[in-house]
Amino acid sequence: MILNYGSLNLDETFAVPHMVRPGETLSSAGLERHCGGKGMNQSIALARAGAVVAHAGSIGEDGGMLTSLLRQSGVDISRIRAADCPTGRAIIQVEDSGQNAILLYPGANAAALDPMQALEGCGAGDWLLVQNETAGTGDVFREAVRRNMKVAVNPSPFDERAAALPLEQAACLLVNEGESAALAGLPVPEGARTAEDYLPLLRDLCRRFPRTAVVLTLGGLGAWYGDAAGERYQPAFSVRAVDTTGAGDTFTGYFLAALTRGESPADAMRWGAAAAALAVTRPGAGEAVPLRDEVERFLSGENHS
């Protein structure tokens, strides 16, 4: 089983010609409301990829649509607790190109769960997945390690709390270029145009965390995987992006689902890249995660050239 201790958000997505600039008032061409939060998106991706997954987190009285979607997707929601505050919110701007900018309000995600309750029934052989949008992540991480669970970490959004996590004890670390640079203490490569330009970041993290598998996602440039056995590259699939919100979460869920069912890192990366490619062709985050049979058809060549 994979237990995801993660965030649950209600997303409000505004269609804009460009990101709002300081002092600017900008009219939106559209407003959509979706289910989101990195934790929720990743749980849906895990479940739709075929993994047995439970979600632990907190919502307010206004979070019923989130638990409904998780339940419909096949996620165990018995570890989701009600908090005495509103559900977390994300205000998302999406440009015509599909690029986005996100403002987060933690809400109920700031209500930490007791680690013993969150991990009840979990032990050796199980996985824990965490991000950095939920209070108490470090305590749950450390308790999972004490139980000999394997921990996958997506330290996003990266800040001092993420840096303080015992990442050297993680089995898998999933980061984008900005998060990898912050962890490595290196600048994001200026003027980078190819995936190879980011190899120094991957190699630095692999040196820092020699017992951890590192996944470095690069959006349209693909993704790198590195561990003690070497490096592997997965190019991105070419699609027309509508909304990139949640693409990394979709990759994470499909990658981890494949890895935990015994597939090779190379195959797991391919699953993640294909699922993310399908997700960006649709609006929203959690709702945009494709089903496994859709990804299988995509990989067979039926839906792309």
Image (cartoon, rainbow, N blue to C red):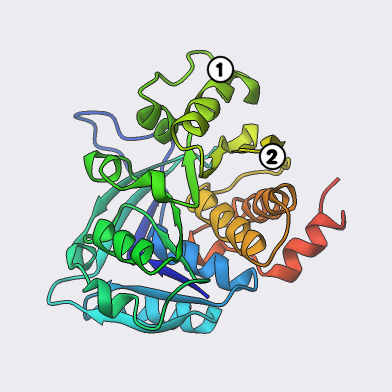
In the displayed structure, would residue 83 be above or below residue 265? below
According to the picture, the residue beneath numbered tag 1 turns out to be 192
Which residue is painted at 48% across and 13% down in the image? 190
Q: Visible in this render: residue 15? A: no
Evaluate if marks 1 and 2 touch, with contact meaning CB atoms under 8 Å apart. Answer: no
In screen coordinates, is 77 left or right of 103?
right
The image position of residue 151, as x and y in percent, is: 44, 58
The image position of residue 22, as x and y in percent, is: 22, 28
Which residue is painted at 60% across and 73% down in the image? 51
Residue 236 - label: 2
Q: Secondary structure at mark 2?
A: loop
Q: In the rendered structure, which disc, 1 or 2, sits on the residue that comes first in sequence?
A: 1
The image position of residue 203, as x and y in percent, is: 54, 26
Which residue is painted at 47% across and 63% down in the image? 41
Of residues 121 and 108, the one drawn nearer to the viewer in this rendering: 121
Which residue is painted at 58% across and 48% down in the image? 242
In the displayed structure, would residue 101 be above or below residue 80? above
In the rendered image, the quadrant that contains the C terminus is top right
In the displayed structure, would residue 298 be above or below residue 123? above
Q: Gap between marks 1 and 2, in whole Å?
A: 16 Å
Q: Visible in this render: residue 208? A: yes
User: What amino acid type is highlighted by mark number 2?
Assistant: Ala
